[in-house]
Amino acid sequence: MTPLAAPQLLTALTLAVGLFGLLIGSFLNVVVYRVPAGLSIVSPPSACPGCGAQIRPGDNVPVLSWLLLRGKCRACREPISARYPLVELGTGLAFAIVTVWLVVLVSTGGVSTSSASGDGSTSAVVANVLMLLAYLYLAAISIALALIDIDTHRLPNAIVLPSYVVAAVLLAASGLMAQDFDALLWTAIGGIAMWMAYFVMAFIYPAGMGFGDVKLAGVLGLYLGFLGLGPLLVGAFAAFVLGGIFAVVLLITKRAGRKSGIPFGPWMLLGAWLGIFWGDAIWQGYLGLIGL
């Protein structure tokens, strides 16, 4: 058991990161509302969408403020959507889950970058922290992009394009600190392969695949490739399985027609997370079934 896997430390780390996730979730509410509208995410300060009254600092505490105000604006008493605290809570839970996943992955040697992490050296700790930051960032943009795509059928460049830089820097730095050059190679392969695959699909059938999906695919490919071939293949394929099942359900229940536009971004993101969490196990199980 590595020091990070000690139960008390894991609990404290998970709680701390989860609380930080609540704060990030509050910021994501701003991102989801303002980015599609082309507004600044830093000014003006948050205000009630009903009366325009600026939100007091004391009323900006994630989840708790909404509960204390009973879901209403302090100034005009207009209802405030439950989506706001749900996004905050969901982000906090997502951050906590990612933290536990990474600690377990490192402690069990389930990722190649953990080969240098068991010795407790400074470089190993830094590599793991950088990896954690990278996947926490992915968790944050996953929530924001999924909600924006559901609302507007768009995946904004303002979020997707900077994510290439963030992912490349954090994952490359983690791989270099761990001296895991295979992870670096697979990161590049994953990003390029998924971008090219989606580009071909968008070129062949532009009505069914937007270029926003293409750009997002490259980002997800970086994260999946960093974890290896299994997570990359499972994460890429799962998006189509999950999205296809959802589309069939909508058709059967007559909630959508054959020409209805269904945002694919949320399924790409969900499929990627399935690949991140369980991709290696699913891939190894598949290889076992076919005798490899």
Image: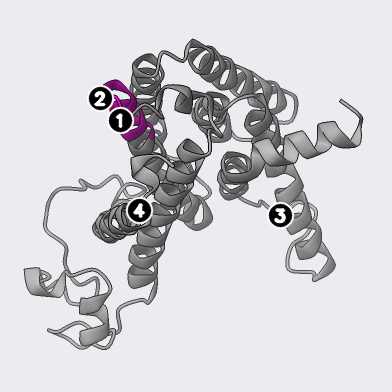
Residue 79, given in percent of the width and then of the height, sits at 30, 84
Residue 179, given in percent of the width and then of the height, sits at 41, 13
Which residue is denoted by mark 4 in the rendering?
Answer: 10
Residue at 67% in and 28% down: 202
Q: Amino acid under label 3?
A: Ser
Residue at 21% in and 86% down: 68
Which residue is denoted by mark 3 in the rendering?
Answer: 260
Whichever of labels 4 and 2 marks the residue nearer the N terminus, that label is 4
Q: Amino acid under label 1?
A: Val
Q: Do residues under tags 1 and 2 come within 8 Å of each other at their CB atoms?
A: yes
Which residue is denoted by mark 1 in the rendering?
Answer: 125
Q: Amino acid under label 4?
A: Leu
Q: CA distance from mark 1 to mark 2?
A: 5 Å
Mark 2 surroundings within 10 Å by alpha-carbon count, few (fewer than 14), some (14 through 19), many (20 or more): few
Residue at 70% in and 36% down: 234
State the SS at label 3.
loop
Magenta residues?
121-131
